[in-house]
């Protein structure tokens, strides 16, 4: 029997690259247009989002994208007052926890994985300034996990 993913499952595949893409877009604000690392990360995150909805009818894609945007904004809203690096770290810590527990799987050479690698390098350059507030990012990651579980996302048990 062929398994077709539910809208919830597709939103779960879209939401993390969408959140990271929004943060990268904010990071690019005020920087020269030619920002090779952030431009490449942005393109790869867009590719990851497109992979999640590839082959779906346009009306279903539109519905899923609207839902993912709404959920992403609601999830990130409590962190809007934090520096953008802390916002990124919160999403990164939460994503790492999901991957470590097996709740999500990230292909080794996927567009998302390549974007992750680029952003890790970018964030390494800012680490000294972010490290004193790392606990804020970790708390925000825990809040993200809790908020998503409360909405029924990423809440299934892993064997």
Image (spheres, rainbow, N blue to C red):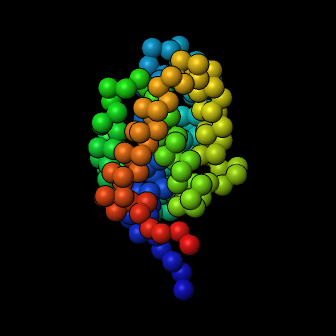
Q: Is residue 155 left or right of residue 98?
A: left
**Can you see residue 61?**
no
Residue 27, given in percent of the width and then of the height, sits at: 47, 23
Residue 125 picture quarter: top right
**Residue at 59% across / 54% down in the picture?**
100
**Can you see residue 84?**
yes
- Find the residue positioned furthest to the right: 109
- Find the residue positioned furthest to the bottom: 1
**Residue at 59% across / 46% down in the picture?**
112
- Comparing 145 with 73, the one in front is 145
Residue 2 picture quarter: bottom right
**Residue at 52% across / 54% down in the picture?**
98
**Residue at 30% across / 37% down in the picture?**
77
Residue 58, given in percent of the width and then of the height, sits at: 39, 58
Vertical order, 19 against 29 (above or below): below
Q: Is residue 15 left or right of residue 105?
A: left
- Comparing 96 with 69, the one in front is 96
Figure quadrant of the N terminus: bottom right
Residue 79 picture quarter: top left
Vertical order, 24 against 7 (above or below): above
Figure quadrant of the C terminus: bottom right
């Amino acid at each position: 029997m062929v398994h077709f993913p539910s809208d919830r499952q597709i939103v779960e595949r879209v939401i993390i690259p969408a959140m990271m893409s929004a943060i990268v877009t904010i990071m690019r604000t005020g920087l020269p247009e030619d920002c090779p690392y952030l431009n490449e990360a942005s393109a790869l995150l867009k590719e990851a989002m497109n992979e999640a909805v590839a082959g779906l009818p346009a009306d279903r894609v539109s519905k899923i994208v609207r839902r993912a945007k709404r959920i992403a904004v609601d999830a990130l809203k409590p962190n809007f007052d934090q520096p953008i690096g802390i916002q990124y770290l919160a999403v990164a810590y939460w994503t790492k926890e999901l991957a470590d527990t097996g709740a999500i799987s990230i292909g080794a050479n996927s567009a998302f994985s390549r974007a992750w690698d680029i952003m890790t390098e970018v964030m390494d350059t800012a680490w000294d300034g972010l490290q004193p507030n790392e606990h804020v990012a970790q708390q925000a990651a825990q809040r993200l996990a809790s908020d998503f579980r409360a909405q029924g996302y990423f809440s299934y048990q892993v064997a």
